[in-house]
């Protein structure tokens, strides 16, 4: 399971003309589920959520990376992004053969979102939809976490 996390001042996700999620200060999390994640996914979800909630992504004046998402009363916007499992080692076309099948990935994505929502306010896009994500990256600060 892969998370690409961006610290943002604001963000939103739109599907066609409808905004399905919007946040102010917080984190945008792009999540990808690979075939390797189909086993032990509950353990992986627990680990990744613990990281999202406890890593000090935010700062206060004169102290960089000193507060976590809960300490700043931030929100999270989660969007599925299977392209994080894309490989471009050979040729010119990305290879997505390591990505989990949508039916399997959606189940794990929903469990991740539900578990995260039990801890913090979460907005989302729609799994598998073509989305436009708008964000103002704060820093820029971007982290990649996998389990």
Image (cartoon, rainbow, N blue to C red):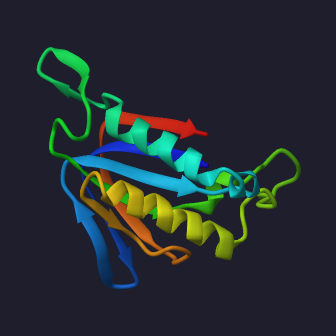
The foreground one among 31 and 83 is: 31
Locate residue 125, reporting x and y percent. 40, 71
Q: Which residue is drawn at 53% across and 37% down?
A: 145
Asked if residue 95 lies left or right of residue 67, the reply is right
Locate residue 147, reporting x and y percent. 61, 40
Locate residue 13, reporting x and y percent. 35, 68
Q: Which residue is drawn at 51% across and 73% down?
A: 127
Locate residue 65, reporting x and y percent. 28, 23
Q: Residue at x 57, y 63 (%)?
A: 108
| 64 shown above or below 35 | above
Asked if residue 34 lies left or right of residue 139, the reply is right
The foreground one among 70 and 115 is: 115
Asked if residue 29 lies left or right of residue 119, the reply is right
Q: Which residue lies furthest to the right in this view?
A: 90
The foreground one among 106 and 62 is: 106
| 128 shown above or below 108 | below
| Snapshot quadrant of residue 24 | bottom left
| Snapshot quadrant of residue 51 | top left
């Amino acid at each position: 399971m892969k998370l690409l996390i961006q610290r943002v001042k604001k963000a939103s996700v739109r599907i066609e003309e409808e905004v399905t999620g919007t946040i102010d200060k917080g984190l945008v999390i792009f999540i990808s589920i690979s075939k390797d994640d189909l086993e032990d996914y509950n353990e992986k979800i627990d680990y990744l959520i613990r990281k999202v909630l406890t890593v000090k992504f935010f700062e206060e004046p004169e102290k960089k990376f000193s507060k976590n998402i809960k300490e700043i009363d931030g929100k999270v916007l989660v969007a599925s992004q299977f392209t994080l499992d894309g490989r471009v080692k050979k040729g010119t076309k990305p290879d997505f053969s390591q990505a989990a099948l949508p039916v399997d990935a959606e189940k794990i994505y929903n469990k991740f979102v539900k578990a995260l929502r039990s801890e913090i306010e979460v907005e989302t896009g729609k799994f598998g939809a073509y989305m436009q994500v708008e964000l103002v990256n704060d820093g820029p600060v971007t982290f990649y976490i996998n389990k």
